[in-house]
Amino acid sequence: MSESNYVLFYVEKPQASAAFYSALLQRQPVENSPTFALFVLDSGLKLGLWSRYTVEPAAAGRGGASELAFSVADADAVNQRHREWSLRGLPILQAPTDMDFGRTFVALDPDGHRLRVFSPSPANAPAAPNERAAAAYAA
């Protein structure tokens, strides 16, 4: 089976979006043209920014119908990222809050794509391999 390791956002102005994500992700795109930019994140995920006017077949929707999520270590890191992004001027759609899965907030990029930062609650955090083995043995 093939891997899902690309996310493509259709954007109004690829160069402006590339500048936004360069500052947000603190890295330069690995590919950059007038109609497309590509970033490779530390996780290996690739984020493509494609002009909504040149993508084929034509894009029908706008940003906001999906999210790019960033997981951080803990609730303090969520709050810190919120402060940083607020100071950068990102619109905040959801202020930091505790939800059933953990601490989270949602910001928007220039095209209205949702950017969720979250820290899983301890009950929802993935167990380390040795914890999973111990739980399986105890069952």
Image (spheres, rainbow, N blue to C red):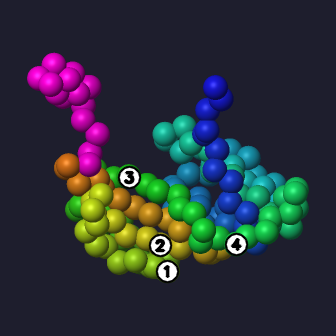
Which residue in the protein does label 1 denote? 91
Q: Does the magenta stretch include residue 125?
A: yes
Residue 56 visible in the snapshot = yes
Q: Is residue 71 magenta?
A: no
Residue 64, how many percent across, how many down?
Answer: 59, 71
Residue 98, how many percent across, how many down?
Answer: 25, 68
Q: Name the residue furthest left.
A: 138
Which residue in the protein does label 3 denote? 71
Quarter of the view holding residue 11: bottom right
Residue 6, how many percent across, how many down?
Answer: 64, 44
Say above or below: 76 vs 30: below
Sequence-first disc among 3 and 4: 4
Amino acid at pointer 2: Ala
> Which quadrant is home to the N terminus?
top right
Sequence-first disc among 4 and 1: 4
Residues at marks 3 and 2 touching, judged by CB atoms closer than 8 Å: no
Quarter of the view holding residue 74: bottom left
Distance (Cα) linking label 2 and label 1: 6 Å
Are there few (<14), some (14-19), or many (20+) residues within 10 Å of tag 4? some
**Residue at x 60% of width, y 39% of height:** 5
Which residue in the protein does label 2 denote? 107
Amino acid at pointer 3: Ser
Given residues 43 and 100, the one toward you in this image is 100
Q: What element carries label 2?
A: strand
Which residue in the protein does label 4 denote? 62
Magenta extent: 124-139
**Residue at x 23% of width, y 54% of height:** 121
Of the two numbered discs 4 and 1 in the rendering, the one whose residue sits closer to the viewer: 4
Given residues 113 and 77, the one toward you in this image is 113
Q: Is mark 3 on a helix, strand or loop?
A: strand
